[in-house]
Amino acid sequence: MSDDLGARVGLLEARIQELEAIEGVRSTILSYALAHDRGQSDKVADLFTEQARLDIVGYGPDLDTTIEGREGIRAMYTALDAKFDNNPPFKHMVTNCHVTLEGESAVAVTYLHAWGGPKTETGPGGGLYHDRLRHESDGQWRFAHKRIISISTQTVGDSIADGI
């Protein structure tokens, strides 16, 4: 009986670790949205690995970009926040976050609804976050590759077909 109990405890521990990892990934995604909406570019950048990649796709020539490295990502968000005196009007709502764990990394697909707010001429919009995150030695899940994809011109399936 004690062997059975030990096995069950082991299974529960594994399940708890899996749930903690999924919640850690989701927490990183939510922290990104909140820090971005509050103009906290340093907090946003700290959610990325040192060698991270950020792709913004399908939002037009003024927004579409690829940036390599945490410091480049920090510079982009710092410049964006400065346009609004570090008080951006954005409101990002993320929903339907699906996480697939792959050892010490994870892939997440999350729906995005965003509003430009009173300081911009940007109306409501949407998209998809297609993220690869890595669990780092400090216990934090960070973005290794973040793709922000407009889904106004393509399906969700087409948006994530290339993988990440």
Image (cartoon, rainbow, N blue to C red):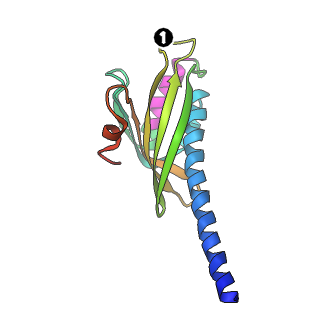
User: 5 or 103: nearer the eye?
Assistant: 5
In the image: residue 127, left or right of residue 28: left
Quadrant of image for the N terminus: bottom right
Q: Where is 13 relative to 143, above or below?
A: below
Q: Read off the magenta span.
A: 73-84
Q: Is residue 35 magenta?
A: no
Give the percent coordinates (x, y) of residue 148: 41, 35
Q: Main secondary structure of the magenta part?
A: helix
Q: Quadrant of residue 9?
A: bottom right
Pointer 1 residue: 121
Give the percent coordinates (x, y) of residue 39: 58, 27
Q: Is residue 64 visible?
A: yes
User: What amino acid type should be assigned to the residue bearing mark 1?
Assistant: Glu
Q: Is residue 75 magenta?
A: yes
Q: Residue at x 33, y 22 (%)?
A: 60
In the image: residue 155, left or right of residue 74: left
Give the percent coordinates (x, y) of residue 54: 40, 39
